[in-house]
Structure formats: C-alpha cells, structure tokens
Amino acid sequence: MIGYIPVYKKLIPVTMILSLLLVVSMLLGLTIGSTGDTGAAWKLLLGQGEPDATLEVIVWQLRWPRVLLAATVGASLSLGGLVFQALLRNPLAEPYILGVSGGSAVGAILGILAGFSLFPGLTLSSFVGSLAVLLLVLLLSKRKEGNSDSLLLGGVMVNAFCGAIIMFLISVSKTSQMQKIIFWLMGDLSSASADSLPLLLGVLPCFLIIFLLAQPLNLLLTGRESASAMGVNVAAVMLVLLLTASLMVSLTVCHSGLIGFVGLTIPHVLRMLLGSDHRTLIPACILTGASYLVLCDLLARSLPSQGEMSVGIVTALVGAPLFIGLLWRGRR
Amino acid sequence: MSLIDIQGISLQYDSLPVIKRVSVQVEQGEFFVIIGPNGAGKTSLLKALSGLHPLAEGDIQIRQRSIGDYSRKELARTLALVPQQINADFPFTVAETVLMGRYPHLGLLAVEGKKDLQLAEQAMEFTEINHLAGRRLGQLSGGERQRVIIARAICQQSKILLLDEPTASLDPAHQLRIMDLMERLRHREQITIVMVSHDLNLASSYADRLLLLKDGEVEKIGTPWQVLTREQLSQSYGCTLLVDENPQLGTPRVSLVSEKVAAKISSEEDACEQKQ
C-alpha cells in the first residue's frame, strides 16, 4: 500500500544498520584517545601484536566503562526526548530543555549532601527531583493547552532556577565531590567506572516498557481524546510513560550530570528520515542516541590538545543551533 | 430495544453543569442529528456517548449494556468518534493514520496484518482519498483531512459513528460529499449515525430525527418537521428563523434573515391577521 511500509520491513533493516553504527562507534571509542597508539589498540582488540599491560588497562578499564556509559546515557536521553515530545505533543520538548534533567540533578545533589549512596538513595532522590519538575511542566501545559511557547519558557526558567540551586548547593558544601561543578552543569562522562554498570541494567527494562507502548504513543500524537476514542487507556499509558521516562533520565543524570540537546537532535533527525511511527523510532532512537553520545564523547576527550572538555559542550554546539533552526521554521 | 439508550444523564465541567438530565434513545440504523445554539452541550453529549466524559448522573447503555462496563478497546470497536480535527504536527502519512483505526482490533504490539491493510484500502477508496495515501496529514486541505478522519473511523469497523460537526468550515461541494458518504455508509453497512451539526438545512434533508439542545437540556426531539418550526427555532436560538417547505425536497427549509427584514415580515403578518 502506498504511504505505508509494514513495520517489520522498516524495523529490521533500520535496527541492523544502526546496530552496526553503534558497534563501529564503540570500536572507535575504545581505540582512539589522548594516550596510547590507536593502531596498537586495534591490534589489542583483534588479539594480535605484543601484549601491552598499560594499553590493556587503558582500553578495558578506562575506555570501555566510559564508552558503555556514553552509550547508555545517549540512548536514554534521546529516547527520553522522543517520549516527552510525543506526550506533550511538542517537537521541541526534551529532558534538558524542559528542566527535567535539572530537577533530577538538584535531587541528586541533595541526595549526596544527605549522604545517600548511589543506589538506591541517590537514584531515588534524583527521580523525585525529576518528577517534581515534570509535574510543574504538565500543569503548565494543561493550563495553556497547545501553547508551546509557554511550555518552553517555563522549562527555560525551571532550568535556570535548578542551575542556580545547583551552584548554591555546591558553593555551600565542602564535600570534595562537589568541587566538580562542571560535571553537573555541563555534563561529563569522566566519572565512568565499573560502578556505573548497574545503570545499564536499570535502563534496559525502561527501554522495553516504552517499546511495548509504541502504538498507543502513535495514537496519542493525534490527540488525547482521539486516542481514547480509538481504545487507548490514555491516563494509564501517559502515567507509565512519564514515570518510565523520568526514571530513565534521572538514572543517567546521576552518572553524567546535565547533557543537553541529545533528546532534541536525535529524535528530530530520525523523524525526518524514518517518519513518525514510534514502533520504528523507539529502537532507532536508542541505537542512534547511543552512537551519537559515544562519538560526541570521543570528540570531547580527543579534540583538546591537553586534558579534555565536557561532552555537554559538544552536544550543545550541535544541538543549540538545531533548536534555533526548528524554532525559526515553526515561526514561519 | 433501542441501540443507544441515554438515561437521564448529567455532565459537569469543573463542577459547572453542561448537560442536565438528558434522556434520549437512538435506534439501529438511524441518522440522528444533534442541533442547538453554541454552548448548548452538543459536543459534551457526543463525548459522553463515546465514553470520554464522566457522567455525574444517569447512565448510557449501548445494546442494553452500560458503557462503564465496556473496556476502552471494546467501546472503540462498538462506536467510532470523528472529532472535528486531529493533531497534524507529527508527520504521519494518510495511510498510517487510517490504519490507526485498526488499533482496537490488534494485540499488544499492534502489528497490522493483510486483512487490516485491505480494510484500510477499502476505507480510503470509500472516502475517495486513496490518491492521497502517501501524503502527510499536514499537507492536506480541511475537507481532505476530514475524510481521512472518517476513513480512520470506518477502518475501526464500529456499527455506530459519532461525528462532531464534520461539515464545519467546508464549502458546499465538500459538505455534500461528506453527508452523502454518511448516507451510503448507513445504507451499505447499516451503520447508525449520530452527528452534531450547526447546519439546520443539512440536518433537515439528511436526518431521520433531530435532538434540539439548549443550555444542556432537551428542548425537542422529533422528525425535522416536528423540530424545525419557526416558533421552536426562534425561541431556542433567540432570533427569527423563517421556515418553509423546500418545494423540491418537501423538507423544512430554514432561512436566516436580518433583524430589519424579520421586523418587516412580522409587521406584515400582523397586518394580514388584522385583515382576517
């Protein structure tokens, strides 16, 4: 039929190509870096050449957790963006722009000050922070239904407010962890270690839940009442999706700080290429978001001749102009 | 027994009553049109019928079963709602949108099979939009988009179709196209049609029965000739509406006249009465 490609005919090739992209990105992430020889790293991965203990440590204990963290965070943020865009029916919605990431960062920092451990205490306090912001955003969107400007302005203000609270909390605290202000405000993946691996286990069920709700999400895009009249239990679907997406975002924020615009860039590009069917978009978003952040992090740690920069700088340099472009196009 | 039995329902919006103890029955295969001034509660009644509005009082039964006892998907298989507009901000194609109507018939992952595609194609043929199948919803005109929404509802295969002002903002040719589509659906598939409309003349020539609502209450239920009288309409709408017989159709014809003309007509009529 014209105008329609069966789901599996789209899903299978798209997933295969994007999985390949992810594998290539991860291999690049493992082999390229500021220290060590790239060629030797490739040989190490292929099991050839002289065994090199230092390089092995660099590749497997430093780069591998970091690549894995980048992939997980990238996948979660871009999927989070996709879900928020669908639920709020606003193509500009995104965890960072809506302030949901900011809220969960404030929650996480309060958790650190209260002396919580990373799991479950910190994750939970960060989850509560993101939910609080989300509730505020939803109230705002309900009051001014269809007015995307007020939603975005609200998000910007919540974000600024959260930024100020983060700065305040950091300036009054003496905890040594708190000195990495940049970590929270610009987003950074350098804290990656074996400790961050449970994050992966936390977000995988979230991915699955969201994928199972792909078709109700499609219907929701045509309007809440319209979806309800076609048999979608709108309240239940929205609640599950909002909770799942917020949980996913807060899990990642605890590990990476505020990384902006991934959730805007990836879903937008994919929607242009693949159309609006979320049954294809959701897996595509997970895979592309993962590859994207692995590559952004690769740039962040290899571009500066000394040290490294925050990955949030790279994503903002790409994402912010895109955001402005979209806003511009929407005005016309 | 009636197909749809609305039993003394009341509806509230933010604790403000919008429908007050309305009772009405719609029969199988009927073309039923709800009319009334703005804010009369027409759309709210339609929403309540499709289970989108909680009832403050009373009950709605479809096939002698309360709609509260239907699951969401069951209800969607029983009746299909055609809203005035659907959101077109996200670039779904026409074919994808029409196929969404299959959702209440599909399982968890909602993967469409051959039969679903066939039904969607038939629905698009029936509404004459198959040439638009690959277009994005945002690129269509108002009349085309309305037909897409109707095709989606047909694809839902429900025996009851609820339409909210489907002809609003359409030119006469498109209005007729939609109304004739409804007629054909009714005859070919024995579909029951409940429609909200502001167009009294369209209602007059297509409806079996009319429900005239005002301020959330039933003013009159009956055939077009019973409801569309000059006294009834002038009282309900608060303005003079002339009613005569359409010489070609034999149905009531409603004409809108300016205040000045209305005054002139009524003074002429008074003079006539005095003569007699």
Image: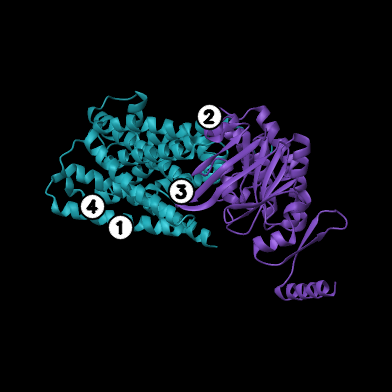
Chain colours: A cyan, B purple
Which of disc 3 and disc 1 is earlier in sequence? 3
Which residue is nearer to you in this view: A227 or A262? Answer: A227
* Residue A166: image tag: 4
Position of A69 compared to B84: left or right?
left
From the image, state whether disc 1 or disc 3 is nearer to you: 3
How far from the left and from the top, in percent, is residue B105? 60, 30
From the image, state whether disc 1 or disc 2 is nearer to you: 2
What residue sits 67% from the left and 56% below the top?
B198
- Three-letter code for the amino acid on which mark 4 is drawn: Ile
Please, which chain is the residue tagged with disc 4 on? A
Do the CB atoms of the residues marked 2 and 4 lie less than 8 Å apart?
no
Do pointers 1 and 4 mark residues of a single chain? yes
Q: What element carries label 2?
A: loop
Q: Label 2, label 3: how many angstroms apart (C-alpha)?
A: 22 Å
Residue farthest toward the left in the current orientation of the protein = A174
Which of disc 4 and disc 3 is earlier in sequence? 3
What residue sits 37% from the left and 39% below the top?
A243
Q: Mark 3 points at which residue?
A: A88
**Mark 3: few, some, or many residues within 10 Å (few <14, many ≥20)?**
many
How far from the left and from the top, in percent, is residue B163? 65, 46
Q: What element carries label 3?
A: loop
Q: Name the residue under label 1.
A: A160
- Three-letter code for the amino acid on which mark 1 is drawn: Ala
Which residue is nearer to you in this view: A7 or A319? Answer: A7
